[in-house]
Amino acid sequence: MSAESASEIPKGQVDLLDFMDWSGVQCLNQSSTHSLPNALKQGYREDAGLNLESDADEQLLIYIPFNQVIKLHSFAIKGPEDDGPKTVKFFSNKEHMCFSNVNDFPPSDTAELTEENLKGKPVVLKYVKFQNVRSLTIFIEDNQSGSEVTKVQKIALYGSTVETTDMKGLKKIEDH
């Protein structure tokens, strides 16, 4: 890990990449030649030449299940200044969402990405809304310029596992 990527991770949090259940990860409206692994997988997401791109229009709907319960603290989404994501909505533990029903549910949190965010500055989420996350749906609603294609260079999720937290709690009880 380079010093630069380590400094991006908020203090006390870990990159949740290792806790994603890759067999269940999905992305709706992705280009077949510029798909989600380009932005999400280790190595690929560090390569500035690789992007996730939307296909029919600017929207993307990404579903990420985890192999254990996590607490989501913050995220970083990198993308180009023009075609990078703008409005990003996060839904905790909502299964089987699609473009036809995504607006039927209130998001757990919504972020408007700035130029600094698109360069990798993490956005802190409403932490209380993401305490017991088994899956996460990320709805990229639009992009910076209003163009037809949204490009995402990197998606990183930062937080902790609930198990880690619980184990610390158990240890304290035993100490008394």
Image: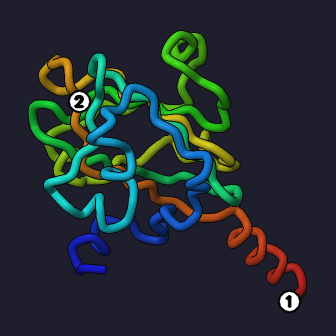
Report the side of 47 relative to 27 (left or right).
left
The residue lying at 27 percent from left, 40 percent from top is 33
Mark before the other along the chain sequence, 2 or 1: 2
Check whether the beta carbons of the residues at disc 2 and disc 1 lie within 8 A of each other.
no
**Residue placed farthest to the front in the image?**
32
Badge 2 crowding class, 10 Å Cα cut-off, few under 14, some 14 to 19, many 20 or more, is many
The residue lying at 24 percent from left, 79 percent from top is 2
SS at badge 1: helix
Checking the image for residue 82, the label placed there is none
Q: Amino acid at mark 1?
A: Asp
Q: Is residue 56 above or below residue 88?
A: above
Look at mark 1 in the image and give the residue it sits on.
175
Q: What is the quadrant of the N terminus in the image?
A: bottom left
- Write down the quadrant of residue 135 in the picture: top right
Identify the image's colour scheme: rainbow, by chain, secondary structure or one colour. rainbow
Badge 1 crowding class, 10 Å Cα cut-off, few under 14, some 14 to 19, many 20 or more, is few
Checking the image for residue 150, the label placed there is 2
SS at badge 2: loop
How far apart are the alpha carbons under marks 2 and 1? 52 Å
Report the side of 176 relative to 81 (left or right).
right
Q: Is residue 159 above or below residue 154?
A: below
In the image, 150 versus 157, the foreground residue is 150
Q: What is the quadrant of the C terminus in the image?
A: bottom right
Q: Is residue 148 above or below residue 54?
A: above
- Write down the quadrant of residue 20 in the picture: bottom right
Q: Amino acid at mark 2?
A: Thr
Q: Position of residue 154 (x, y in %)?
A: 29, 52
Q: Position of residue 26 (x, y in %)?
A: 52, 39
Give the foreground label among 2 and 1: 2
The residue lying at 22 percent from left, 36 percent from top is 151
Q: Position of residue 88 (x, y in %)?
A: 37, 31
Q: Position of residue 16 (x, y in %)?
A: 51, 62
